[in-house]
Image: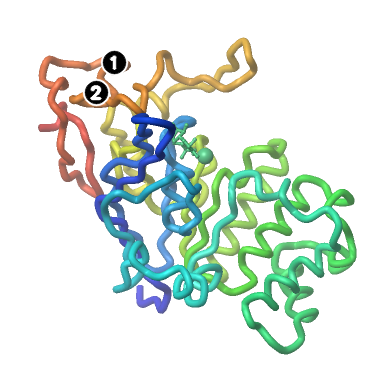
Amino acid sequence: MICDKSKLSVLNLNVHYLEGPGRVIKAVNSVSFEIMGGESIGIAGESASGKSTLGSAIMRNLEPNARIIGGSIFLDNIDIVNLADTDFDREIRWKKIAMIFQGAMNTLDPVFPIGEQMQEILRSHGVEGSLQNRTLASLDDVGLDRSVAKMYPHELSGGMKQRVVIAMSLLLDPDILIADEPTTALDVLVQAQIIKLLKSVKIKRGISIIIISHDLGVISEIADKVAIMYSGEIVELANSQDIFSNPKHPYTQLLISSVPKLDSKGTIVSLKGQPPDSANLPEGCYFLSRCPFAMEMCRKKPSPLNTASGFVLCWLYE
Ligand SMILES: Nc1ncnc2c1ncn2[C@@H]1O[C@H](COP(=O)(O)OP(=O)(O)O)[C@@H](O)[C@H]1O
Ligand SMILES: [Mg+2]
């Protein structure tokens, strides 16, 4: 497939959070993956596995206490880790890479009508011409009635707000859209509609979607390939078909086979035990304490082993 969209290569990326004296949270550890123009990837894994940090690092939107302490993020041939803020803002943010942040639909400005908020995004990026026409067309694109332009966030349902957020993210026609938990706060029927919308966006515009979700079902609908994260590492990367039909890493196998259950606090738990403290990661395999196949060897750190369509980080396949 020949495609004019940008290619993204993340190479050996490490992101830490500095959390008080001497306490360093290792949120993203040696992460590498690549997507060709128009190719979509799913990032899956339990809560706190580093998914949002990875997305925010690519969008250059990390919290002030976060540090990229190693690695590169190439957009085509440019390492955006080393790009000056002004250059990133002018050339890349929203134009090449856009992001729907986790919970974004709750951060719409309550005092301005939707249409004005959308026009402001265009204006702030130097777009000229009929901003109103462009805004209305983008409401059409996400299946919203044009009357929404005059409405305020509190007049919209959750699903409508999420469509607005998607429309905003697409206003400057990005090559890559990072969608962080885009369906999480929505009820099941609306979730299905939002997934359908993202799928059609991907097909119609030919853009890459990086879909971040703790829900493999959501990912299976959109992603061409899947990265499974555990304690900030990608423990398995493969094309979607291989991940679901032939999962290799014991963690991937458990994620796929486990039927989500609710615990006493009402949060979804699908696996027993806890991942290690990310301020105090063990020397060997991070999954060791929860792994049904743990061996003596696993006290040593595994290195990525190539598979049919990606890699697995596990001694079982050595
Ligand atoms: N601003 C922050 N300061 C310190 N630690 C953070 C901060 N944001 C996230 N973390 C920690 O980084 C790790 C990864 O978090 P996150 O990227 O949000 O994971 P996920 O999106 O997979 O739930 C977690 O241990 C989380 O507690
Ligand atoms: Mg997150």
State the residue position of label 2. 282
The image quadrant of residue 121 is: bottom right
Give me the residue at 89% from left, 51% from top: 155
- Please tell me which residue lies in front, 1 or 104: 104
Res. 170 mark: none
Numbered marks: total: 2
State the residue position of label 1. 289
Asked which secondary structure carries label 2, the reply is loop
Q: Could you give the CA–CA distance between mark 2 and mark 1, rounded to whole angstroms? A: 10 Å
Query: Which quarter shows the C terminus?
Result: top left
- The spot of residue 79 in percent (x, y) is 31, 67
Give me the residue at 18% from left, 41% from top: 304
Quick check: marks 2 and 1 in contact, CB under 8 Å? yes
Left or right of 92 in this view: 173? right
- The spot of residue 287 in percent (x, y) is 29, 23
Give me the residue at 61% from left, 67% from top: 170
Left or right of 265 in this view: 283? left
- Amino acid identity at mark 2: Pro
- Please tell me which residue lies in front, 304 or 131: 131
Dot placed on the residue nearer the N-terminal end, 2 or 1: 2
| Residue 31 vertical placement versus 76 (above, below) | above
Q: Residues within 10 Å of mark 2 (few under 14, many from 20)?
A: some
| Residue 46 vertical placement versus 120 (above, below) | above
Question: Is residue 9 visible in this depiction of the protein?
Answer: yes
Query: Which quarter shows the N terminus?
Result: bottom left
| Residue 156 vertical placement versus 50 (above, below) | below
Question: Is residue 230 visible in this depiction of the protein?
Answer: no
- Amino acid identity at mark 1: Ser
Residue with the most extreme front position: 21
Q: Residues within 10 Å of mark 1 (few under 14, many from 20)?
A: some
- The spot of residue 6 in percent (x, y) is 39, 72
